[in-house]
Image: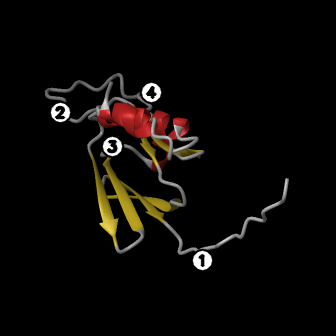
């Protein structure tokens, strides 16, 4: 039995099965190594993910958000390049899919491709704390 299982089996953490699945998915995504990326803290509530995508154009890249999973995919169109004869090919030309699991409340602010780096900016907007009183009924 792992520590993670013990943590999520606590009687004080109810309904966290989905969170356990998200952590497992994030661990699998972390094992991938292409393309290399950075995650940078920008201020109190903002984060930037930067991926090294040299050779990819904006049309070769797709960013999707499904639930809390951010997916960045790159597909290289090699049509018309078949006649190239490389003496050395050190720049990766393969497609990729890189996924990130976002925390609740983290929103994608935008993305831009600059000097071979794809920057995806995320932020957590300030929210007012709501305290809700729960009525008690007599049984």
Q: Determine whether, in the image, residue 51 is placed left or right of residue 129.
A: left
Residue pointed to by mark 3: 55
Q: Which residue is mark 2?
A: 90
The residue at the point 56 percent across, 43 percent down is 14
CB contact under 8 Å: marks 3 and 4:
no
Confirm or deny contact between disc 4 and disc 1 (CB under 8 A).
no
Q: Does residue 67 appear left or right of residue 50 in this picture?
A: right
Q: CA distance from mark 3 to mark 4?
A: 14 Å
Residue where numbered disc 1 is placed: 128
Question: Which image quarter: residue 67?
Answer: top right
Find residue 119 and name its label: none
For residue 56, which quarter of the picture? top left
- Mark 4 or 1: in front is 1
Q: Is residue 65 above or below residue 86?
A: below
- Residue 22 lies, in percent from the top left, at 47, 38
- Residue 97 in sight here: no
Q: Nearer the viewer, mark 2 or mark 1?
A: 1
In what element is the residue under mark 1?
loop
Which of these two is toward me, 50 or 24?
24
């Amino acid at each position: 039995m792992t520590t993670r299982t013990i943590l999520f089996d606590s009687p004080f953490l109810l309904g966290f099965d989905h969170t356990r699945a998200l952590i497992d998915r994030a661990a699998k995504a972390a094992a991938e190594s292409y393309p290399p990326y950075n995650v940078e803290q920008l201020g109190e509530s903002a984060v930037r993910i930067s991926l090294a995508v040299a050779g990819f154009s904006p049309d070769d890249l797709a960013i999707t958000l499904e639930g809390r999973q951010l997916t960045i995919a790159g597909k290289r169109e090699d049509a018309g390049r078949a006649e190239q004869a490389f003496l050395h090919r050190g720049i990766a030309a393969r497609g990729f899919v890189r996924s990130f699991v976002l925390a609740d409340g983290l929103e994608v602010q935008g993305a831009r491709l600059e000097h071979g780096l794809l920057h995806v900016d995320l932020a957590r907007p300030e929210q007012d704390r709501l305290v809700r009183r729960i009525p008690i009924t007599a049984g």
